[in-house]
Amino acid sequence: MRVPAIVRGNELITATGAFGAQIRHAKKLQENPSVLSAGFFICNPFTDVPELGSQAYVFTDNDQDLAEQGALKMANDFWPNRKIMQGQFVSLEKAVSMGASMAGPIAFTDAADAPSSGSSGDSNAIISEMMRTNYPHSILAPLADPDAAATAHKLGVGGTFRMGIGGTHDNQFVPLELNWSVISLADGTMKCETWKYEPTIGPTAVLRSGNLTVVVTTGTVMLVDRALFFKVGLDPKDFHSTIVKSPHCEPAFFDDWVEANFNVDAPGATSANLKTLGHTICDRPMYPLEEDTEFIPQVEIFSN
């Protein structure tokens, strides 16, 4: 059963959020031997395709009524929660202003540029605002910028250069031009804190300009934990503010020890502020792109 809504945010955490009701119902349905599979697709809001939307499904062993009733309940339970299943944000300007006045440590979640969600990892939006406003604290940030990484490796540790960084892949970001010092160099792979694979980072460099430390990688790296920082010998706990390019990290990585974690409403290809993404292909109307979208339940039957 198709539901004309795309969603994002903390209410999708199944253990604590509203979306968990659909998952628990699907699991309950599967206790019935006639139910072969059941679940709920929320799709990826960053893929602008005709099929985009949400969908409840139930596959049974030739019991159409059971399948219809199960899918209908999940869809009807989901629809009233569509509004709370959206991201909750702090504006970029407000987050930076608040962080500047706090003792710290602070995390700035930049989900709009999360490589794990499909972004390019080269947004400099938050650090550019920090530099514009003369942010008074130490800052640690990751950034995919192969040109900056190559320049650093050419010059070596201790080298200095002036270059704009950021916006290498996504040209909505204006390169942040500063004087940089090469603090350290790295290459190869990094070992994730929880996942069992070791992503390749390519030639990587730690650059510093005043109170800003940036880890620039050649490739776009999955940033689901602190592994990249540890790889280059840095610990976020040694900095007042850290840019976190993942929508959700395990609490121990940041939330358990920071004074605040701002979910920043920054621009980017994977922003949870879904209205900003510029969908043109998906079926319309679609909530929240159209606030007045109506849901008329209609079961689709597939059989063989």
Image (cartoon, rainbow, N blue to C red):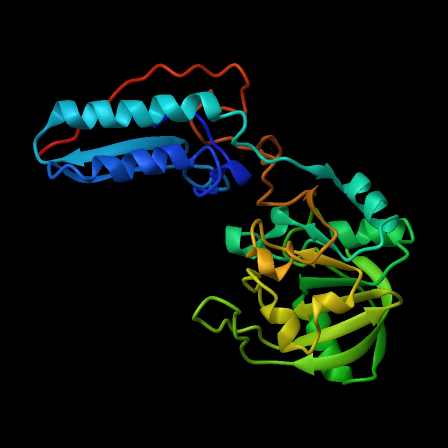
Q: Nearer the viewer, residue 211 or 44?
A: 211
Q: Residue at x 65, y 81 (%)?
A: 186
Image coordinates for residue 180, horizontal then vertical, percent: 84, 71
Where on the picture, by quarter, is residue 245? bottom right
Q: Residue at x 61, y 70 (%)?
A: 228
Image coordinates for residue 56, horizontal then vertical, percent: 31, 31
Where on the picture, by quarter, is residue 64? top left
Q: Nearer the viewer, residue 116 or 123?
A: 116
Q: Report whether 236 appears left or right of 131.
A: left
Where on the picture, by quarter, is residue 70? top left
Q: Report whether 203 appears left or right of 10.
A: right
Q: Nearer the viewer, residue 106 or 228?
A: 106
Note whether residue 51 is visible: no
Image coordinates for residue 194, horizontal then vertical, percent: 49, 66
As displayed, is residue 247 above or below residue 5?
below
Q: Report whether 192 appears left or right of 124.
A: left
As displayed, is residue 274 above or below residue 150?
above
Q: Residue at x 56, y 51 (%)?
A: 248
Q: Nearer the viewer, residue 42 or 175?
A: 42
Image coordinates for residue 34, horizontal then vertical, percent: 11, 36
Q: Residue at x 68, y 62 (%)?
A: 143
Q: Quadrant of the N terminus?
A: top left
As displayed, is residue 288 above or below residue 14?
above
Q: Quadrant of the C terminus?
A: top left
